[in-house]
Every structure is written in structure tokens, then in C-alpha cells.
Image (cartoon, rainbow, N blue to C red):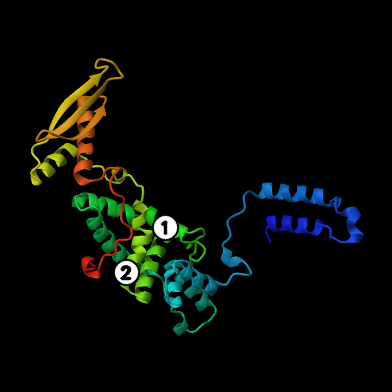
């Protein structure tokens, strides 16, 4: 029993019973409470911070009920054996097999499934749907932008963030606690695979849309994808779309010969202003203006129409390969 639980027990024991015979002692703690609490606090400080303990170690823990509640919270129908497999890491499965072998259990019972296959299937489904969704939501963005945004959505950090907020942390069977970001991300992919096997690929697509694609909500796309050579890319896009040759023009400058110099450059095509930007020199201002022009051409500005997260793509529009 940890020291924190000992402290809770001491306080509970020191609390007087609320009846007529103990009215005199209700306003006072026992004499031994104060020195006991000081000693326990000293031991806690000496031992250092307590390591996090998984909820599965609590007496009232019921794993089957937790799995059932997990699916109901997400409003999804899972096959419980598949869902349990989705939460089982390979390292834990190997450890469990070794433990059973040491106990002398027959070899036929040592087959403990892990989530590697479900994770591979879920990753394939998520990648296919995210790419299809970006093509419909951002039709004017080139493939390089789609790849950068898809990499952000399917990256370990984003998937681990989604997995954590779905409540997978306490349900994962792993040899480490708390689970790492890689474990959380792989578990989320396995959950997608388990959902596809339990309720069909269409439900898995909606799951990806509702929990992964929505991470783009109120997100500045320029922070995710910034072209390395914006002026060259703008020239290629303008030539491809027959918008005319982009022409940068100096619109104004301030403090030209000082350390606080600022230049404003605008980029025109066919006498139409595509974008403008500021910088400490003309080159920087030109690149900033080119990025602003690309945002206009690709419809990536912050004031663009919000993403439609109610969009339902048909299975034929998603290339599962």
C-alpha cells in the first residue's frame, strides 16, 4: 500500500463518528494524528515522487466492462476479442507467452494475439481516407501540400494525441507504463483495423474523419506546409493555370538605411494583385509575398471556408489499393 493511501487511512481513522456520545471530540483530532502525518510526509519526501500506477492494478478494475464502455463511448460496435487484441502490444504478448511457458502451460495455449496486423490494416485505411479527404477538401492544393498535411495528420504525435483523448492509455496491454507515443499511435491504428473487421470499412472511414481529419479544425495550414521555394512554385502554378507571369513590385519601404528597415512587396499577374508581404530586405519581402500569393491561389488562407467534417466519401472514391 502506498504512502498516500496510508495518509488517507489515517485521516479516516481520525475522523470521529457523528453521534451524541462524541460531540465533545468532533472539533478535535487525536493527539497521534499530527505526528503521524508529519512522519508520513517526511517519508514521502524522502522517497521522492510516487511512480504512476495503472488503473488495472486496482481491486475494482473490470477489463471486460472497460472494453465494452470504450466502444459505447465512441458509439461504435466492436467485437470484444478484436478490441482486446487491438490493445495488446507485441512485447506484452511475448511476455505473457513466456510467463505461461514458465508455469508449464501447454504450448497450444501460448498463442497470444498482438495488434501488429490490426495496426497495419488500420494505418492503410487511415492513409487512404485522409488522402481522399484532402483531395476533396483542398482541391487546389498540389500533391506536395497534400502529402505534407497527410503526414501531419498521420504522424505519431497527432495519432498519440487522439489516442490519449479517446481514453486508450489505461486499456493498453504493454510492458511500459505510461505507454509511449509510438504505442498510443499504434493502438489507435489497431482500433481502426478492429472497427473495420467488426462493423465494416465504411464505419472505419467515418471514425478516421471524425477523430483524425478533425485535427485540422482551426489549424493554420501554413504551419504544416510551407513551400521551400515559393516564388518558383508560384511561377509554375501561374504558368499551369494560365494566370500570367508573376511580377514582384516594391510597394513601399521604411527605414531603408537603418537596422529597422522594412520593405513591402506585392506580386502581380495580369495586373491583378495576388499577394503581398513584408520583410527586412527585398528578398525576404518577395518570398513572403509569394507565400501569401500561393495561399490565395490554393485557397489556404485563414479566412477560407471551414472544413466540412460532415463530408461522406463513398468507398469507390477512397483508394485502398
Name the spot of residue 106 as percent of width and height, x first: 49, 84
Q: Name the residue beneath numbered marker 2.
A: 121
Camera-side residue of 109 and 188: 188
Report the quarter where the C terminus lies. Answer: bottom left
Secondary structure beneath label 1: helix
Q: Is residue 186 left or right of residue 169?
A: left
Select label 1 or label 2 by which is in front.
1
Q: What residue sits right under mark 1 in the picture?
A: 162
Relative to 270, 172 lies left or right = right
Tell me: residue 216, above or below residue 79: above
Q: Label 2 neighbourhood size at 10 Å, few (<14), some (14-19), many (20+)?
A: some
Query: Residue 15: horizontal and vertical position, in percent?
Result: 81, 57
Looking at the rendering, which quadrant does residue 123 occupy?
bottom left
Question: What residue sits 43% from the left and 79% below the top?
Answer: 111
Q: Image quarter for residue 222?
A: top left
> What residue is rendered at 49% in x and 62% in y?
167
Amino acid at each position: 500500500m502506498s504512502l498516500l493511501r496510508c495518509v488517507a487511512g489515517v485521516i479516516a481513522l481520525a475522523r470521529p463518528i457523528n453521534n451524541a456520545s462524541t460531540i465533545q471530540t468532533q472539533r478535535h483530532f487525536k493527539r497521534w494524528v499530527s505526528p503521524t502525518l508529519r512522519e508520513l510526509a517526511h517519508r514521502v519526501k524522502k522517497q521522492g515522487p510516487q511512480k504512476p500506477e495503472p488503473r488495472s492494478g486496482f481491486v475494482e478494475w473490470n477489463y471486460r466492462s472497460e472494453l465494452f464502455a470504450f466502444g459505447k463511448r465512441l458509439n461504435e460496435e466492436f467485437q470484444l476479442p478484436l478490441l482486446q487484441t487491438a490493445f495488446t502490444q507485441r512485447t506484452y504478448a511475448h511476455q505473457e507467452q513466456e510467463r505461461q511457458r514458465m508455469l508449464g502451460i501447454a504450448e497450444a495455449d501460448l498463442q497470444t494475439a498482438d495488434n501488429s496486423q490490426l495496426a497495419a490494416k488500420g494505418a492503410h485505411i487511415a492513409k487512404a481516407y485522409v488522402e481522399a479527404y484532402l483531395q476533396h477538401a483542398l482541391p487546389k492544393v498540389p500533391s506536395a501540400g497534400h502529402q505534407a498535411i497527410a503526414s501531419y495528420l498521420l504522424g505519431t504525435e497527432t495519432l498519440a494525441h487522439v489516442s490519449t483523448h479517446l481514453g486508450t492509455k489505461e486499456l493498453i496491454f504493454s510492458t511500459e507504463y505510461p505507454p509511449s507515443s509510438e504505442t498510443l499511435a499504434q493502438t489507435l491504428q489497431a482500433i481502426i483495423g478492429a472497427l473495420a473487421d467488426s462493423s465494416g470499412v465504411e464505419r472505419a472511414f467515418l471514425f478516421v474523419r471524425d477523430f483524425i481529419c478533425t485535427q485540422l479544425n482551426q489549424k493554420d495550414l501554413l504551419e504544416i506546409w510551407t513551400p521551400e521555394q515559393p516564388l518558383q512554385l508560384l511561377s509554375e502554378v501561374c504558368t499551369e493555370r494560365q494566370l500570367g507571369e508573376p511580377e514582384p513590385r516594391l510597394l513601399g519601404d521604411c527605414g531603408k538605411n537603418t537596422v529597422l528597415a522594412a520593405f513591402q512587396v506585392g506580386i502581380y499577374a495580369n495586373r491583378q494583385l495576388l499577394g503581398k508581404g513584408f520583410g527586412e530586405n527585398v528578398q525576404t519581402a518577395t518570398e513572403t509575398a509569394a507565400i501569401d500569393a500561393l495561399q490565395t491561389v490554393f485557397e489556404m488562407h485563414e479566412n477560407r471556408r471551414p472544413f466540412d467534417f460532415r463530408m461522406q466519401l463513398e468507398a469507390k472514391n477512397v483508394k485502398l489499393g
